[in-house]
Amino acid sequence: VTVFRIMKVFVRSRPTATFAQELIEILPDGKTVQIHQSKGRRCGGYHAPSSWCFQLDGVLHLLSQEEVYARVGQEVVLGALDGYNGTVLCFGQTGAGKTYTMTGTTESYRQRGIIPRAVEQVFQEVAKRSDHIFSVQLSYLEVYNDTLTDLLSTLAGPQHLAPREPGGRVSIRGLSLHPVQSQEEALDLLFEGELNRIMGAHAMNNHSSRSHCIFTLHIQSRSRSLSGTTFLRSKLSLVDLAGSERLGRTGGAGQTLREATHINKSLSFLEQTILALADPRRDHIPFRQSKLTHALKHSLGGNCNTVLVANIYGEETQMDETVLSTLPSRMFLRCKSCYLKCVNELQVNGGGARYQPLSEAQQAELQDQVQRPALSLSPLSHVTESPALSLSALNPCPLKSQPCSTPLPSACSSPPTKAQAFEEFKASGGAGLHRLLRSNKEVLQERRALLHLLGQELNAAKRDIDAAAEDVQRRGGDSAGRLRGSEETQDVEEALVGRLGALRTRYRQHHDQLGPARAEVRYCQHLVDRCRVRLLSEFESWYPNSLLSPREVPEGGSITPGLVPPDRSPSLVSLLHGLPWGGGCGWSGTHPGDWGLVETGARFLHHRQRRSMVVCRSERAVAVISVDSETARCLDVGLIK
Ligand SMILES: Nc1ncnc2c1ncn2[C@@H]1O[C@H](COP(=O)(O)OP(=O)(O)OP(=O)(O)O)[C@@H](O)[C@H]1O
């Protein structure tokens, strides 16, 4: 019978200024949540009880990343180093903080999540447990629309493909395993995978939050002293599940609907699998129902420490999603240490949310999945084939001539170069990201300076040790020749030896700080790289849109500020020349079909139906001009001084 070694369930709430404390009540024991619903409110096709009470292993409300890790991650990591599989799994609605919990934000080192902290702890423990030989390998897998992608397949260098062992510990054929010797190496791979995920998401229409991600450390250890002891093997799986959403809520069609269907189906299968594992009467566990559950085989049942973190977004508008999709999921209800008592009406309602019955087509697809042979991995071709997100992408577009710097009415057919457009982007749509990049760079510089200082101190300590050791040696020689046995000599020697000991301790302390400091610099460097890639990739999607003609933009669609249609130029030019600051606010495109950038800070705001709004700014005033797009007549000018 498969049982969980330890199963814990936590709820983590994302902080919000409008936390619905009337509806979500956290009891003082820190382990109980009561959800209150207005009576008779219908949720998902059944009458919800008016009040639900969840008893958990902990409610992580307004806790820092460090505190969350201490409650959620530490024990699982220690278990993994002792040879027990461990899994931490975040689930919950979109935007509730799963990725924040698992990986953390790009904003600061302090806000790093469970994965980087677990990596840090693993290597700290490995260093401590010097009586054992450890080897650590790493894999990073993404499951999107029931397709598996190896997020580290792009890496050159030493890597192993996961073997298909007869006993079947690793069952995903083709998944690359990367040996890692240190925290830094492991974090490198984490960031590499994240980068691939971001770039893949960019290439594939931003599905980053629509995929499940499994970051796994494969740990193997053996005692150094006991010969003949067997290797202990364990897997530490850190799982960031795609956001659960009800299909109706997403309101999507086509790809969005397909994604949502896949997500919900795979989450439903995961739930069934966990329920089956938690039920001692079950002898068959349906791991092969979906790629996600297959990939998590050995990371859930058996001798596994499993921690579920239900991320919730505690705003009133999110209540249905929180209550329906996250808390009363049956997985959540029946897990060993989590039981639910419905204060009022649970028995009447039979408890638990019900999933929609599967349609015939869905059943057929499932049948097909079940019968499909072993999983295969799709190569990450979309990543490598996507346009390179490097600075070369910012080279001026060949179609465009020199930037126009002459004020109108001189004709100039040059819309902004790509590099200029990038500057514009950094000041507008990408301003937040650009600020973040700058602040991350500052943090990086600070950490680098600290590391440098530490290195210098370490070198100084080393020099002092060498000098003191020489001194000890020299005096030892002297005393052997001349002063042997005198009390004074013994005192001096003792003092010297004491000093040497103190210097060595100082050296060791600095040395111990060096590893984490290096890792921190690496981490910050990666944050900077990641921000840079994000900025570039967002620019790449912004840039073509910024060249759209308002006539090509669907009604009500947004137009990137900065560009105005050239065939409106005569009226605009005269209009702009009529403004209080004269012709300083010119604009450049005049060729039909071409586009011009309004210079000197004038911006095209939006175009709706027949109206275009242009904002021009000078040092003295701001003008908002409304133009009829058909006749190019000025409809209205507003001046703000
Ligand atoms: N505990 C928290 N403290 C501070 N900010 C948070 C917290 N949880 C989430 N956030 C912020 O909320 C936003 C959404 O979080 P996140 O991306 O982690 O959600 P998610 O559940 O992973 O969403 P998705 O399912 O779409 O991937 C992010 O900007 C994140 O930084």
Image (cartoon, helix red, strand yellow):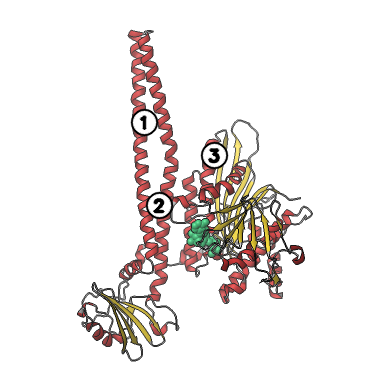
Kind of residue at badge 2: Gln
Query: If you read the primary sequence from the N terminus, does the residue marked by circle 3 or circle 2 appear first?
Result: 3
Q: What element carries label 1?
A: helix
Disc 3 to disc 1, C-alpha distance: 25 Å
| Other residues around mark 1 within 10 Å, as few (<14) / some (14–19) / many (≥20) | some
Query: If you read the primary sequence from the N terminus, does the residue marked by circle 1 or circle 2 appear first?
Result: 1
Residue hosting label 2: 525
Q: Is mark 2 on a helix, strand or loop?
A: helix
The answer to whether mark 1 is within 8 Å of ligand 1 is no
Work out whether 422 lies above or below 32.
below
Residue hosting label 3: 126
Query: If you read the primary sequence from the N terminus, does the residue marked by circle 3 or circle 1 appear first?
Result: 3
Task: Give the quarter of the figure containing the C terminus.
Answer: bottom left
**Viewed as shown, does residue 553 lie left or right of 90?**
left
Residue pictured at 49% horizontal, 45% vertical: 183
Q: Please state the horizontal and vertical placement of residue 20, each as a whole percent of the image.
A: 57, 63
Kind of residue at badge 1: Lys
Disc 3 to disc 2, C-alpha distance: 25 Å
